[in-house]
Image (cartoon, coloured by chain):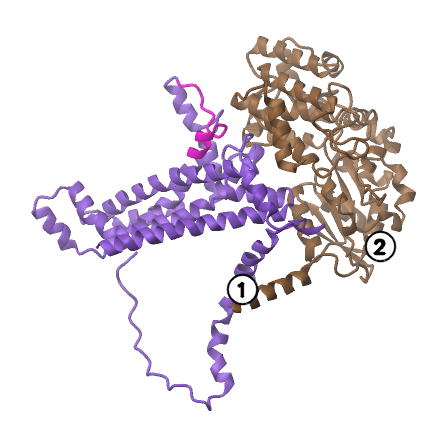
Chain colours: A purple, B brown
Amino acid sequence: MSTTLAPVPVAPAEPPAPRVGTPLRERLAPYAYIAPFFVLFAVFGLFPFLFTFYVALFDWNPIGDQTFIGLDNFTRMLDDPRFWNATRNTVSIWFLSTVPQLFIALLLAHLLNHARLRAALFFRMSVLVPYVTSVAATAIVFAQLFDRDFGLLNWLLGLVGVDPVDFVGSTWGSHVVIAAMVTWRWFGYTTLLYLASLQAVPRDVYESAAIDGAGGWQRFRHITVPALRPVIIFTVITSTIGGLQIFTEPLLVSPGSSLTCGSVRQCQTLTLMLYEQGFGRYEFGYGSAIGVALFLMVVFVAAVNYLLSSRIKADR
Amino acid sequence: MKLRAIVAAVLLVTAACSPGSGEGGGGDGKSFEFWSFSGINQKAAVEEYKKKRPEVEVKLTEVGNAQETAQSLTTALAGGKVPDLVLIQGDDLPKFVEQPQNFVDLKTLGADEIKGDYLDWVMAQSVAKDGQILGIPTDVGGMAMAYRTDLFAAAGLPTDRESVGKLWPDWNAFIETGKRYTEKTGQPFVDNAATSVFYQAVNQGSQKYYDDKRELVYSTNPQVKSAFDLGIKAAQAGITAKLASFAEGWSAGMAQGRFAVVAAPSWMLNAIRSNAPDTAGKWDLATVPGKSGNWGGSYLAIPKRAKNPKAAWEYIRTMQSPQGQLEHFVKSGALPTTPSVYQDPQLTARSEPFFSGAPIGTIYTQSLLGLKPFYIGPDSTTIGTEFLNAITNVEENGGNAATAWDDAVRNIKTAIGK
């Protein structure tokens, strides 16, 4: 957010190389200092992660029998139309939320970086307000805005003579509602990331471009966007990983049938289906298999992103 | 090598966590832990018990709503610390009845002596395949239709509960009444087709999704098909407000009089009171089409690894006796499951001013007496949800009514694999 760096600590004198005679306790001490994080991570991160792979190979009833069935959960999943429906929904919602979000953030960051902006700090901070608002609160407000019978949006449409639209009931409509929530929640955070790295661009570059006759749009295209390229790649990766795991918004948007996100699963995402199978039907094995599939998708997308970004770096 | 060590460690931990390790008992017998739902004021019943048995300490935890309580119980049974006594909602019960080894067989504590006190079909739902009794019923829903007398009068329909009940001896007559109402007023008649019509009608049969041998018959049982067809018919009649039960729009619609009728088991009365406080005195209760029906109800069970099963059983014996359930009804309106008190003046005399003085004790208990026991299995909830979704799809999203049944059956096959 700001360019001022914390003062660089004075490097301590080079520690003497541990000799054979150093007591064991002293040699283990550093490990003890970093242990809290790794212990907690092992218990709450690594163990559940690995355990998911293990459970995915079972027909696993948490309070009943647990039978090893090999890859049956995965073959079932590949034949399950609900899985492919959830995959389509997830990708669609991810696309609808990420693309506008990054564009809005890019433009906003450019504007907020303007030299003559008054009350800059106020505007810069206020874009972060949606980010600190609870997802549940956002979801409830958006569900009401888009409500079929009493929603503000349908009231406005009614004023110009358009029949009420059942946003949450339709496939595209529910995706738009959820994408709007995600965009609303994250655009401010992304804006600040962009703004932070924009501030590293020397102001004289903009000034000299202006003297050379470059307009606002040209400065945006030829200075702002290239300068932000690394952080744009970073935000694409993080929002993709986040977007593939979207859960709370689809869970809350359709209160009549929350686990399926509507009567024909029109906005059920992969994580929501995982939750439905695991905690709605207590099929932990099948739920875990979906979790493994989701993990592989995230790894795949991250790998593609990595290849793309290293190519871009090589080009520069 | 390292990875292999990690995996080995994981497997060891897994083995250590597997359920069923350890037996129950060993508590002090003077206290017990009790998990219940929030929002049903279980505290009042516990206070009552403390007056009767001051030497016993009850540690009550309101875990969350009914579903969250069942989820927490599942987690606890799978390897955590279990309560001594837990309240389970009827919808969640079959999953636990399928795995009776997780619970104390209440017959060992004397359930055989009292099981005759309760409605047989309610009791039957908590009996496992091998005859083990898992739970004692605490309350049932019963069934009635709540309707708005002012809206009925405006539509030229009768308003007193006797005549309204006569308007709809069966569900077809109910749909016809709805058409009359909607023609006259231009307003929807009932909140939705899926819950208020299909869900009620399907519970009035002698068999539902399983037959008496506990085999799945959801796709071949003519009773299910005809209930489904009624739901589709109601959805297409243009008489529904297309508001899914318990959704936000539903609560708002109730307050604004967007529909005139809603299926109302006894516990729904509190929901109507809190959703639409300004409509006090404008509601009344009539019999449900088909006369009898039930929606909801809960059970008290004791997990196998409970530390104080005896103290928990004492609580069940005292509070869920016919007299105990009658006292609880007088205080809270929760309908007893013990038919011996259904003629008690304390029950029949109770009238509700919010619902135009309707005698709820009589209306609801009468709806229970004609019911027959049918088996509710582990997949009943999933099957029901798919049927509900299929009807809602026709009602709200303009889905194809002609293929709705086949679509629903196919979705159920996908979901439960049989």
* Circle 1 residues within 10 Å: few <14, some 14–19, many ≥20: few
Closest to the observer: A190 or B339? A190
Q: Nearer the viewer, mark 2 or mark 1?
A: 1
Q: Amino acid at mark 2?
A: Lys
Q: Identify the chain of the residue marked 2, using the numbered disc in the image.
A: B
The x and y percentages for residue B224 are 71, 24
Instruction: Classify mark 1: helix, strand or loop.
Output: helix
Where is residue A168? Give x, y as percent.
48, 30
Q: Chain of mark 1?
A: A
Compared with B385, B14 (above or below) is: below
Q: Identify which residue is drawn at 50% across, 75% down.
A: A32
Left/right placement of residue B5 relative to residue B167 reads left
Indicate whether residue A112 is drawn in magenta: no
Residue B283 seen from this side: no
Q: Main secondary structure of the magenta part?
A: loop
Q: Which residue is mark 1?
A: A42
Residue A8 locus on image (x, y percent): 29, 71
Q: Identity of the amino acid at label 1?
A: Ala
Which mark identifies residue A91? none
Which one is nearer the viewer's eye here, B38 or B329?
B38
Residue range of the region highlighted in magenta in the rendering: A162-176
Residue A186 sits in which quadrant? top left
Q: Is residue B312 left or right of residue B110?
A: left
Please state the horizontal and vertical placement of residue B118, each as a whole percent of the image: 85, 36
Q: Is residue A166 magenta?
A: yes
Residue at 86% x, 38% y is B322
Task: Give yes or no for contact between labels 2 and 1 (Cβ–Cβ under 8 Å).
Answer: no
Give the labeled residue for mark 2.
B310
Crowding around mark 2 (Cα neighbors within 10 Å: few <14, some 14 to 19, many 20+) is many
